[in-house]
Image: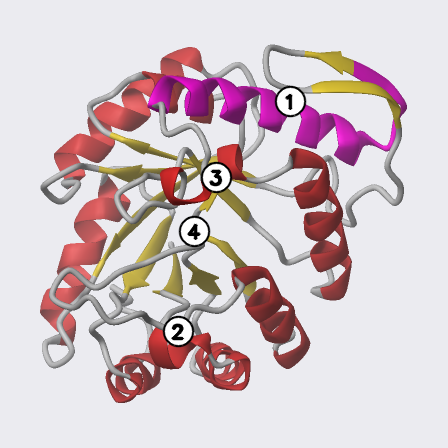
Amino acid sequence: MKFAIDIPHFGPFSNPHLVAELAHEAEEEGWDGFFLWDHINFKHAESSEPIAIADPWILLAAIALRTKSIKLGPMVTPLPRRRPWKLARETVTLDYLSGGRLILGVGLGGDYYGEYHDFGEIADARIHGEKLDEGLAILTHLWSGEEFNYEGEHYHLSRVQFLPKPLQQPRIPIWVAGNWPHKKPFRRAAQFDGVFPQKSGSEVTPEDFREILGSISIQRTQTTPFDAVAFGLTSETDKARAGAHVASFAQAGATWWLEHFAPHHTVEQIHQRIHQGPPRF
């Protein structure tokens, strides 16, 4: 199993120098990855005050330059509010900058913080699903380096060809997020390289993981490696308990554990957790 730090890009974590240094510390302490949220808008539930937010892609570039071996990427970027061709350029450039360490997490994204309707964009989840599927098709075609046309419901491309191809081949790994027990996101995930299950209103359990991966295995036609990502916060003081908790997910098929921090966590708390090292078992 591999282990990563997963943080928001708000408040103090909007500072690219700080975030890059945290990633460097994580690499030094034996973590395998460092991931960022991807929001364009965010509001604290308990406050109407605006919050500082950084662009996650610029932060990821800073991380790439400050580290040498850990994986990095957005967990997750809402592809329906991105232009797929712009994302294609960003991801390939970041893949080269990092020496082939990028993992692309994708999902629908939500409108809870007005990240669609505040900017005059459609907030219909069904439309978002359609745009996600079309966006993924366009993205992977653009990564191929071949010229192609595309005619979809939402996107239309004519004789486009992007070079260079990604450093990672056959492509940059794509992890697809979804809320269980909705089935469609997991059918989508089966076509790619990993899954990041979530569950509205509660935590994903090891039992959920077994059911999710069982469903995906039936639909999966590729024989390439497939990652399954679990997340949460483990005990800071009881390493045996932390290891046992993570081991229960590994036994259910998870291949990554993300130590997942929320906006209310402090820089010092994340420093401490990084230096305690991954919850190995």
- Regarding mark 3 in the picture, which secondary structure is present there? strand
Q: Where's residue 118, x and y in %?
A: 38, 44
* Mark 4 element type: loop
The tag earlier along the polypeptide, 1 or 3, is 3
Q: Residues within 10 Å of mark 1 (few under 14, many from 20)?
A: some
Marks 1 and 3, Cα distance to the nearest angstrom? 13 Å
Q: Is residue 90 above or below residue 212?
A: below
State the image coordinates of residue 58 (x, y, percent, origin top left).
Answer: 61, 67
Q: Is residue 80 left or right of residue 260?
A: right
Q: Residues within 10 Å of mark 3 (few under 14, many from 20)?
A: many
Q: Going 38% across and 12% down the picture, which residue do you hit?
A: 218
Tell me which label, 1 or 4, sits earlier in the chain: 4
Based on the picture, tell me whether residue 92 belongs to the magenta stretch.
no
The range drawn in magenta is 125-149
Label 1, on which residue? 137
Which residue is denoted by mark 4 in the rendering?
75
Give the amino acid type for the residue marked by disc 3 in the picture: Val
SS class of the residue under badge 2? loop
The residue that mark 3 highlights is: 106
As drawn, the label of residue 52 is 2
Locate residue 272: give its quadrant.
Answer: bottom left
